[in-house]
Amino acid sequence: MNKSIFQVEQIIKNLSSFQDKIQTLLVLGSGWNKVIENMAIEKTFIFEKIFGAGAGVLGHRGELFLTKMGQKYFWIMAGRFHTYEGFSSEEVTRPIQAFAKLGVKNVILTSASGALNERYKVGDIVVLSDVLTLLCQSPLNGASFQDMSAPFDKDLRKIAVKICQSNQIEYQEGIYVYCKGPHFESFADKKALKILGADCVGMSTVPETIMANFLGLKVLGLSCVTNLAFVKHDHQEVLANAKKEGNDMKLLLTQILQNC
């Protein structure tokens, strides 16, 4: 990524005259794009213009939207950056760092993941309760010593759970573990991760969660189970299964944003 946090901040600042009114950033992972259909899109920008790099993963649109719902404005990143694309953990968090400087207070991180917990089914939405950071290079430098005892905001989690319950959306509450990828984990990897306490596994979310906590932001993590971990799968299957749950994802995110 060839743009610094300051450069990204200045570019975004020039995009809108009402930065201080935008409290929430929504990051859309694989399969979560349908929520954009509910939004009044004020402006659209490609990642290359804003961040100096494009989204290089199928299912990630690589667009930044300034959107409005009711009287509220939101930033929506349709896609994200991953360490397996060659970026450092710090680089993949630069969008969050820039938006925090511009006044964003809430970050909603979405993703697709593989189920390690045998109770999980394809299509379940996991409201993340914790993360395993052991395999993630920290995006922080120096003697930061960030507390990660409560990485996700309890009030935002309660809102997400209540919405799932009210709308009969199949959900779980569980722990997400990060693996760099881009290969899917071996069966032996998955057995080890399950022993460590993980319920689902993916290739994002954790660097952003660490940085957002460091910046004092409220974080909500949501992951859609798109494959069962102990069977063979590929990225096309992940996207296809995520697409099937698009309406539930849209409903969930729309109602969460209304409560932010």
Image (cartoon, rainbow, N blue to C red):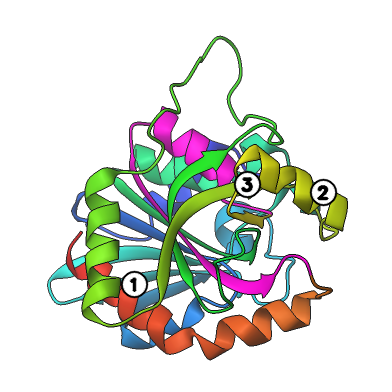
Q: Amino acid at mark 2?
A: Asp
Residue drawn at 40 percent across, 46 percent down: 99
Rendering coords of residue 13 (x, y %)? 37, 50
Amino acid carrying mark 3 in the image:
Val
Number of the label disc, if any, that sits on residue 177: 3
Residue sitting farthest toward the left: 71
Q: Could you give the CA–CA distance between mark 1 and mark 3, rounded to whole angstroms?
A: 22 Å
Instruction: Please state if 220 lies on the left or on the right of 59 as rendered.
Output: left
Specify the quadrant of the image occupied by residue 221.
Answer: bottom left
Which residues lie in the magenta part? 203-230
Residue 158: give its label. Answer: none
Could you say which is closer to the camera, residue 143 or residue 130? Answer: 130
Element under disc 1: helix
Distance, label 2 to label 3, CA atoms, is 11 Å
Mark 2: few, some, or many residues within 10 Å (few <14, many ≥20)?
few
Seen as rendered, the residue at the extreme top is 143
Q: Nearer the N terminus, badge 2 or badge 1? A: 2
Q: Which mark is residue 253?
A: 1
Q: Is residue 258 on the magenta stretch? A: no
Q: Nearer the viewer, residue 29 or 242?
A: 242
* N-term-proximal mark, 1 vs 3: 3
Q: Which residue is label 2 attached to?
A: 189
Question: Percent x, y for residue 39?
Answer: 31, 82
Disc 2/disc 1 C-alpha distance (Å): 32 Å
